[in-house]
Image (cartoon, rainbow, N blue to C red):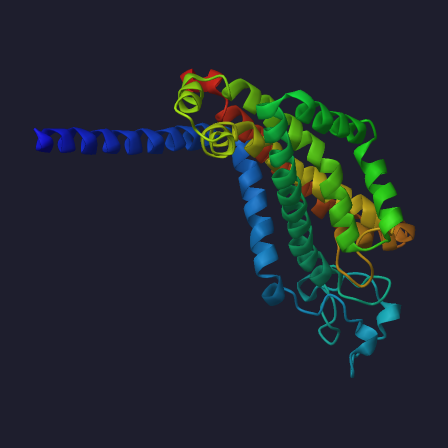
Amino acid sequence: MSQEVQVIQSLDAEGLSVQSVSLWNITWHRLLRRKSAIVGMIILGIMVFIALTAQWLAPYSPTRSMLDVDGYPVRPEKRKSPCIHAFGCPQDQPQHIMGLDGNARDEFSRILYGARLSLMVGLLTVSFAIVIGTVLGALGGYFGGWIDNTIMRVMDVLLAFPSLLLAIAIVTVLGPGLQNALLAIGIVSIPAYARVVRASVLSVREMEYVSATRALGGDALQILFRRILPNALTPLIVQGTLGIATAILDAAALSFLGLGAQPPTPEWGAMLGAERNQVFTAPHLVFLPGIAIALTVLSFNLLGDGLRDALDPRLAHVS
C-alpha cells in the first residue's frame, strides 16, 4: 500500500512540474507570436551585446581626447566630421566613423560605452524601486488599516508631482551626480510598483489556499511572502520592463540638464546636452545619442507590451 502511495505522489509531482513548465512555454509562445515583442527583443539583444563587448568594440577610449594622443597625425579640433576609409576618407587620417565631439573624443566609442551605462541605470533604478515598492505595497495590501493608509498616502504625495520634476528637485537638494540621479529616479518610481503590488495582494489574499494557510495557523509574514507574493508578481514583471525604459529616459533628461552623469562620463543624455549647440554645424553629434536613447527605450516598450499581452490570462484562448 505504501508503494502505491509513493507512486501516486511521484506522478503528482511530475504532473505539477510538467504543468508549471507548460505554463512558461505557453507564455513564451504567446510572446513569440507578437511581432512587436520580437522586434523589441532583437533591438534589446543588440544593445546588451554592445554593452557587454564595448571594451573590445570601441576603437578608442571613451574619455580620452585625441589632443592627448602623442603623434596624432591631424589636429583634432580641425576635423570633427566622420572619417570612414571605405567612403573616401584619406588613409593617412585616423578613422572615426562617427567623428569627434567638441572635446576631440571619439564619438563612436562614447556611444558604445553609453549603452553599458544606460542599461545599468535602468536596471539599478528599477531594481531599487521594485524592492522598496514591493515591500510597501505588500504590507499595505495584506495588513490594511492604518498601515495601508499611511503607506498609500505617502505614495499619493509622491504621485502628486510629475516624476521628472520631483527627480530634478531631489537631485538639486542632494547635488548633481550619477549616483544621486539614480537615487532620485528610484525614489520617484516607487509609488507605481507599490500600487501595482498592493492591488495584486488585495486580490490574492482572499483566495482559498491563503485562507486555508491562515486557518492552519500560518505566520502572517510567511503567508505574505511565500504564498501571496509569488502569485502576485505577474503585473510587476510587465511594470518593471516598462519602467526600465522610463528610468533610462529620465536619467538621460537629468544628464542633459547637467544634473546626472558628469563629464567626461559617456552617457547619452550628457553627450546630447554637451553638443546641443552643434545641431546645425555637426548634427550627427546630436542625432546619434538621441537615436541610441530612442532605440533603447523603444525596445523595452515593445517588450513590455508583448509581456503584458502574453501574461494576460484573458488571452489564453489565443495560444
- Indicate the position of residue 140 as horizontal and vertical percent values: 63, 27
| Residue furthest bottom in the image | 71
Q: Nearer the viewer, residue 28 or 20?
A: 20
121 relative to 55, above or below: above
User: Across the whole image, how many numbered discs are drawn on residues?
Assistant: 0
Based on the displayed image, in which of its 4 quarters is residue 152 positioned?
A: top right
291 relative to 301, above or below: below
Q: Is residue 100 left or right of residue 37?
A: right
- Indicate the position of residue 280 as horizontal and vertical percent values: 90, 49
Residue 97 visible somewhere in the drawing: no
| Residue furthest left in the image | 1
Q: Nearer the viewer, residue 34 or 155?
A: 155
45 relative to 78, above or below: above
**Quadrant for the N terminus in the image:** top left
**Quadrant for the C terminus in the image:** top left
Which residue appears at 71% of the width and 41% of the height? 247
111 relative to 296, above or below: below
- Indicate the position of residue 314 as horizontal and vertical percent values: 48, 16
- Indicate the position of residue 68 as horizontal and vertical percent values: 81, 78
Based on the displayed image, in which of its 4 quarters is residue 29 positioned?
A: top left
Q: Is residue 300 left or right of residue 174?
A: left
Q: Nearer the viewer, residue 223 or 135?
A: 223
Based on the displayed image, in which of its 4 quarters is residue 184 positioned?
A: top right
| Residue furthest front in the image | 217
Q: Is residue 303 left or right of residue 186?
A: left
Residue 154 visible somewhere in the drawing: yes
